[in-house]
Image (cartoon, rainbow, N blue to C red):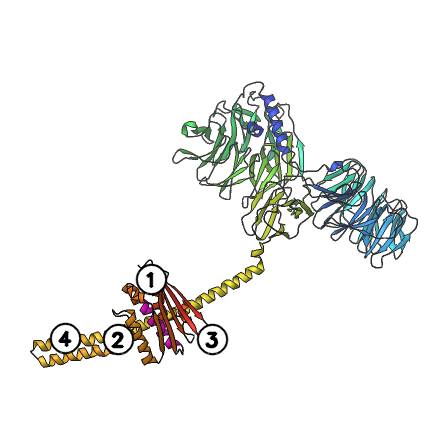
Amino acid sequence: MIRVITSSQKVSFSACLLKTSKAKCIVFVSLSLFLMSFSSYGYNSSPLSTYSNITKIAQDKRGFVWLAGQQGLTRVDANANITFSLNNQEWPLPYSWIHDISLIDDQLLLATETHGLWLFDTRTGKAENIPADIPRQSHYNAVMFKENFYINAPNKLYRYDPIDKKTHVISHDIIISNLVHNQNHLYIANNEGLFQLQGETLKQVINGHITSLVALSDAIIAITPDKIYRLSDDGQLSSIKHSEKIYSLTKAFHNDNFFTISNTGKVNKYNGTSLLTLPHHYGDSEPVRLRSTFHDASGVLWLVSSHGVEKLNENYITNHEVIFDIPINANEITLFDNEIIIGSYGAGLQNFLKPVFDPNINVDFTKAGLKIFDVLEINQKLYIGSKDGLWLYDKSSKKVTKLDAVADKLILKLEHKKNLLYITTNYHGLYIYDLSTEKVIKHISVADGLPNTEVIDVLPLDTGILWIASINNISLYQPLLNKVITLITPNKSKVISFVYTDNKIFASTLGDGILVFNQQGDLLAQLSQGHSFTEMILFNGEIWASGKPGLYRISPKNYQVTMIENTQQYSFVSSMVVKDGTLYAIHYSGVLALNLSEQKQFNPNVIISKTTISGKSYLLNKTIEIESGNDVITLNLASLDYRPGLEKQYQYRINTNPWQKISNNQLTLTGLASGHYNIEIMATNSLGQWSDIKAYTEIRVAYPWYWTIELRILYTLLVFFIVLLTAWLLFLRTKSIKHIHNLLKDDMRNYGKLMNTIQRNLLLTSSSLANNELEQSKQLIEKSLLVLKERINAQEPDNLAGKTLSIAIPFLADYVQSKYEVKLHYTLDDKVDDLNYELRANVYKVIFEALMSAIFKSEVKNFSLTLQEVKQKLWLTVNSDNDSFSQLNSKINFDLASYTIRQITTKHHASLNTFDNDDGSSQLVISFPLMTLN
């Protein structure tokens, strides 16, 4: 709410502008805005200044910074700290007080006060004791050099060989203040000088008190009270003089240059080869004697003293303090005569770095005219927009005069294009002023369609269309149609500034970020939503935006918004100018100058710093395997950039799905379905730039026991074989049906031939009778009757033909006996001929088809048939002395007989069963329900 209220602090004074208490009100509100805005960019989640007992700092291969001291071992990841110590049950160590640490691959070598020497695994948080045979467990320094451990226990130097597990004493009586090494040599330093280990002997190579020591890749840097020495590995010694008290130095992270920090806090940078001083952008630190110094991968200097840990980062900006005796130090800057000048809000025109105006330049201004809102140079003339209308400064006369163009109206912004001056006002809309005729040629107001009388900025395009910012609205004025169209936009806060580039219009807002439109007014993007921006300018194809707080660089191509380092402490008013490769931006207490030389983007490691699975935590991350989707997975994320700046942003995606933003540095996943998930995580650095380095992890959610990989393979094979078997059975069934169709087709063909013969004879008979040829007609009729008789005599008894079963079945027995030499024994119930004819005919058809099928498909010799009514069912039982009926049950491989029998049994709801006996005989049993039929 404060941001919304105070967004009008200079741009709009639509309420109580003329009241005398307005200045105090605005000062209070402006200060509130600054404090609120700056607090939203808090960087340090842990108070490093409270760590007053740190002795050593190191950075591991992943980018984590480790602090060793009396509190234990602390891992710093720019979001949260984890301290491993005797007092932490979640991350325990058998001790707390650590004197020294050094990095060995993924491990830290720890020299402790009470428990000797340990190796700490930075991946797991587990520590392992090194069993060196040293009587005192208080170890002050330790390093690993050429596969051996060198340990400084009080007044002795030990070497421990981890292969033969033997401990050797190199020096029995020596005080050691520093113990360092490079690839070729090991050095110790004390009040007497610098010593180099040669074999098993320490040889003094530099005399004098060594106050600080650091190893380079091929040399050692040693500092005495008056000199800085460089001793190369080949024995060459060089030095330079110094006049400061230096107790701490550190090697630059990426090269062999080094830094020294004096007791007064002065930082110097030196070339590690020539010892020449080098330029740098670090300011002074707190004037205190340092214990240790470290330079990390992000360029931060970590300074350790009894006052805690101080972080010093490079500063590429210069602040010029400019404060006038006015209620609100909200001023404007511009270039005039190639020099920067200031238009103040109450003190008129003012010089900046070089004098441009005479001391009496402001005497001709009215009191309201001294409150300047905008200044603009056009053709060596300076136009001034003020609370009291439009003014002009003439270089030749060195005086200001008031123009009558817009009378005494409050002017907010001046824009120039094609000899036209566009004048925005707080209460009267937009004026277009012709510089040639010195007259207003157009006035656009609420009557023309503007949503509000307050116009904050205007952008004239080459097409003639004007983009107009009025409070929280954006309108387009089309001069050919003399029409104003107001866009529908997502912002609720004021629109402050426009920039046109790359065929797009960028609009800054006080609270809703930056809106991006195409020339038709369609919204393309909304950048840095929730941030407040004021002025924007275009330089070298990039947009520079001043904000509350911070300065930002914006890429029109990919919309990357980058905060400029060390500008987050300033709240900027409005205008910016570029002169001689330097950007000048005005803020409430002065003008900030930024060198626009190209700075390389720092891509920090993006790390999963801690993984928690259903309450159990472990460091870093590995492939996560869980039993079910009910487990809760929490990933703590870190972007290992230790510079101050913007709050880091995180986003993730699962497999190849779209990227999803994360509201903080924790990603919590639960309810995952069974399967395998690949997760990618991106993060920004401290300046808001997305790092090129991503974090990855895998999650495997176990399948239920019935859906494991092995069982799914088995299911697949089963389905395959089932499909294959089904296809084979369908093939056989299709083959059987096709065979039946062929039989029916042949039968129909035979009947067709018979009917054609009889039809022909009847036609001839009719013709003969017509010709009165009675004898020939008689012969034709006899011939037809003979054909029918032969057909009837040749036909099998395959139907009941109107007879009873007691007659038809004995006839059938005689038929199969005479034609196939198969005996049929039968027993018939007396009641069967009382049944309706349809059932009797169908039962007979079943008997005939069953017998014929058995005769043709087996070597049967005897049949036994029983037909009787029992309990409202007609039971048909046929016994065969051979395997004769098994094919009748098949729905796949069947013949016409099987098909006919199945159709009849289905029609009468009958049940059909076949049985194979051990002696090779078989049985067919069919039961016909009589209740539904009778």
Q: Amino acid at mark 1?
A: Lys
Q: Which mark is residue 418?
A: none
Q: Which residue is mark 3?
A: 919
Q: Which residues are magenta?
A: 842-857
Callout 2 crowding tier (Cα within 10 Å): few <14, some 14–19, many ≥20 = few
Q: Which of label 4 and label 1 is nearer to you?
A: 1
Callout 3 crowding tier (Cα within 10 Å): few <14, some 14–19, many ≥20 = few
Q: Nearer the viewer, residue 814 or 531?
A: 814
Q: Is residue 213 something one can see in this rendering?
A: no
Tag 1's secondary structure? helix
Q: Which residue is mark 2?
A: 750
Q: Is residue 395 magenta?
A: no
Q: Mark 3–mark 4 contact, CB under 8 Å? A: no
The quadrant in which the N terminus is found is top right
Inter-mark Cα distance, 4 to 1 = 42 Å
Q: Which residue is mark 1?
A: 907
- Residue 830 in picture, x, y percent from top left: 31, 67
- Tell me the quarter of the picture where residue 891 sits: bottom left
Disc 1 or 3, which lies upstream in sequence?
A: 1
Q: Which residue is mark 4?
A: 763
- Residue 887 in picture, x, y percent from top left: 41, 71
Q: Nearer the viewer, residue 401 or 570?
A: 570
